[in-house]
């Protein structure tokens, strides 16, 4: 009975968390998924992966069922391997319910992994549950689950605490630790296979911490670099499918990403004004509360100072106080775009760690104030989050809701209205360089816009005939709506030099090339007529499935080795006790 009483606070918080997950499902099913920021982009990714899995195939590198049917290389260039399991386990659901389920699964996994990570670091079970629920239902974790769908960084966020503790261990090691190398390698693989730019962000943060150790602490530890390098190599091997796709398609010549070379940041005033319960670009309200309590009531220590300096560094990287103009021309770093998007999401980790370490001793006693306060926050968090998601969905501002019919009608298989909303959703990323605007703005050429919203084919004399596109497995059927004379025709599709295509007109194979503007051009033996069907298919390299299987087996094998090692370590500790 005393054992049950001891765990009762944690059980109560866990129950409220589960109730919140149920509530979120009900609210989002009732109100639907509204378009905000990258939501349509990531829903389209699931839409494409889902279709491939329904046909028992790996996703094609080019997108024909999404992104307006232009055959854009989003699938190939945007890492999605860690998204595959989530799409697979939710595959029986209709698309919209599948998206809602994926968001809830990410929330549940974030809470579970955070809890297990804290328990492994010897935090009391109740405290681990409190901290995990507070972290999961606030800040960026709650933002991506309720406001703007960002599945890549959402998956990375599941493992944010294991990553934090692994990096802490990295800087403590004085020699090469093969199991730490393996642990970091697996975590880096999850990052690279979910959102490649986040790997660059992490490398940038680690580099700044290394500089602090070398220049301020005068502590040059060769083991840190050695373990880091070996972890990077491990990750590169395990991330072969993503890196293979990236370099294979890049040889085609791709448009530079939106915002490349134009890094922007927030003012301090903007960061303060944007503080809320769920946030993406600044501190969450609960993080500030925990920081304030630690500063005013906690005992000052060297560890507290270092954690606060780390938090201050992350906050500084979100602002225009950092000299971004000095690095916005450096390759890879010049893709940061808007720095609060990149660094602001990590501002919720340190406050929780800081509170747990600052009040480590009083937190061990449930009758003391620090424990009661954390319990109160944990009990309040699901209730506040529930009200937040209800208010968000009841916002009277007119919004576009994403539904199955909307996805079907907004992908280029029928003509759509060329309005401001669709212009916003038509992205330039990963298009052939010849078809893209030359600056870094988030727009496409007028020709691309016309081909997306009013698809047509054109002959060498620029005469046009309307078409409608029918996405098929690994390609698209283009149905000609009017006669068009000529022997050479531009199709409303991008053409990538390194991708293998098959193009047929009424079942007869024809030659396909890339024109000067980056679109597909076919040569036929005769003019095209109303009712003709042009079928275009593209194929991933034959080596790609082999690389995927090898990487998957290696990943599972590494997890198994690490699991066995952790089990042996635990057994040794139990025997000593």
Image: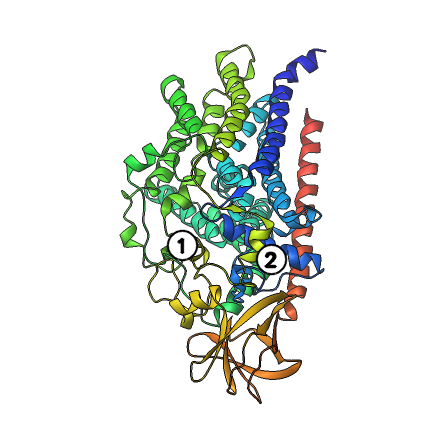
**Image coords of residue 27 (percent x, y):** 57, 33
Disc 2 packing (10 Å; few <14; some 14–19; many ≥20): many
- Nearer to me, 478 or 472: 478
Give the residue at mark 2.
Answer: 48
Mark 2 vs mark 1: give the one in front: 1
Structural distance between the alpha carbons of marks 2 and 1: 24 Å
Q: Secondary structure at mark 1?
A: helix
Q: Secondary structure at mark 2?
A: helix
Disc 1 packing (10 Å; few <14; some 14–19; many ≥20): few
Check the image and report above or below for 171 versus 2.
Answer: below
CB within 8 Å, label 2 to label 1: no
Check the image and report above or below for 546 versus 463.
Answer: above
**Which residue appears at 63% of the width and 61% of the height?**
59
Give me the disc on residue 463: none
Inspect this view and state whether residue 50 appears. Answer: yes
**Image coords of residue 411 (percent x, y):** 54, 60
Q: How is the image coloured?
A: rainbow
Give the residue at mark 1.
Answer: 420
**Image coords of residue 519 (percent x, y):** 47, 74
Check the image and report above or below for 350 versus 206.
Answer: above
Quarter of the picture holding the N terminus: top right
Quarter of the picture holding the C terminus: top right
Tally of marks: 2
């Amino acid at each position: 009975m005393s054992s049950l009483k001891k765990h009762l606070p944690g059980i109560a918080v866990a129950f409220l968390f589960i109730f919140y997950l149920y509530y979120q499902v009900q609210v989002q099913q009732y109100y639907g998924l509204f378009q905000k920021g990258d939501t349509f982009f990531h829903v389209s990714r699931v839409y494409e992966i889902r279709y491939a899995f329904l046909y028992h195939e790996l996703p094609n590198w080019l997108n024909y069922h999404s992104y307006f049917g232009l055959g854009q290389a989003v699938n190939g260039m945007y890492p999605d391997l860690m998204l595959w399991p989530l799409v697979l386990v939710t595959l029986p659901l209709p698309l919209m319910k599948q998206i809602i389920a994926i968001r809830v699964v990410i929330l549940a996994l974030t809470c579970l992994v955070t809890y297990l990570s804290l328990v492994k670091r010897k935090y009391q079970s109740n405290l681990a549950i409190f901290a995990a629920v507070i972290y999961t239902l606030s800040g960026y974790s709650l933002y991506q689950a309720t406001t703007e769908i960002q599945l890549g960084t959402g998956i990375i966020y599941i493992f944010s605490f294991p990553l934090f503790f692994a990096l802490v261990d990295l800087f403590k090691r004085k020699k090469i630790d093969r199991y730490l190398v393996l642990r970091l390698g697996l975590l880096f693989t999850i990052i690279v296979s979910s959102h490649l730019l986040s790997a660059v962000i992490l490398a940038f943060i680690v580099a700044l911490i290394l500089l602090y150790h070398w220049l301020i602490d005068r502590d040059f530890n060769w083991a840190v670099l050695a373990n880091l390098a070996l972890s990077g190599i491990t990750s590169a091997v395990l991330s072969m499918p993503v890196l293979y796709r990236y370099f294979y398609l890049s040889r085609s010549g791709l448009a530079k990403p939106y915002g490349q070379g134009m890094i922007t940041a927030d003012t301090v005033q903007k960061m303060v004004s944007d503080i809320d319960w769920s946030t993406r670009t600044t501190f969450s309200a609960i993080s500030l509360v925990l920081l304030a309590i630690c500063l005013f009531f906690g005992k000052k220590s060297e560890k507290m100072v270092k954690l606060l300096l780390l938090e201050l560094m992350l906050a500084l990287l979100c602002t225009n106080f950092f000299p971004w103009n000095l690095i916005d021309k450096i390759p890879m770093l010049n893709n940061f775009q808007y720095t609060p998007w990149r660094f602001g999401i990590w501002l919720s980790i340190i406050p929780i760690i800081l509170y747990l370490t600052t009040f480590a001793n009083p937190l061990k006693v449930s009758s003391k104030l620090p424990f009661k306060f954390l319990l109160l926050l944990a009990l309040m968090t699901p209730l506040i989050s529930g009200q937040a998601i209800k208010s968000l969905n009841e916002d009277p501002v007119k919004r576009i809701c994403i539904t199955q019919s909307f996805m079907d009608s907004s992908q280029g298989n029928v003509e759509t209205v060329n309005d401001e909303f669709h212009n916003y959703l038509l992205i330039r990323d990963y298009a052939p360089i010849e078809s893209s605007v030359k600056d870094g703005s988030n727009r496409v050429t007028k020709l691309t816009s016309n081909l997306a919203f009013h698809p047509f084919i054109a002959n060498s004399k620029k005469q046009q005939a309307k078409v409608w596109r029918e996405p098929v497995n690994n390609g698209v059927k283009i149905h000609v709506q009017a006669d068009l004379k000529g022997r050479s025709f531009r199709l409303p599709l991008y053409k990538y030099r390194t991708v293998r295509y098959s193009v047929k007109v009424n079942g007869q194979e024809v030659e396909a090339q890339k024109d000067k503007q980056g679109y597909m051009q076919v040569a036929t033996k005769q003019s095209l007529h109303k009712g003709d069907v042009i079928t275009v298919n593209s194929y991933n390299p034959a080596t790609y499935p082999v690389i995927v299987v090898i990487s998957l087996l290696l990943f599972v094998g590494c997890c198994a080795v690490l699991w066995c090692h952790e089990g042996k370590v635990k057994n040794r500790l139990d025997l000593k006790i």
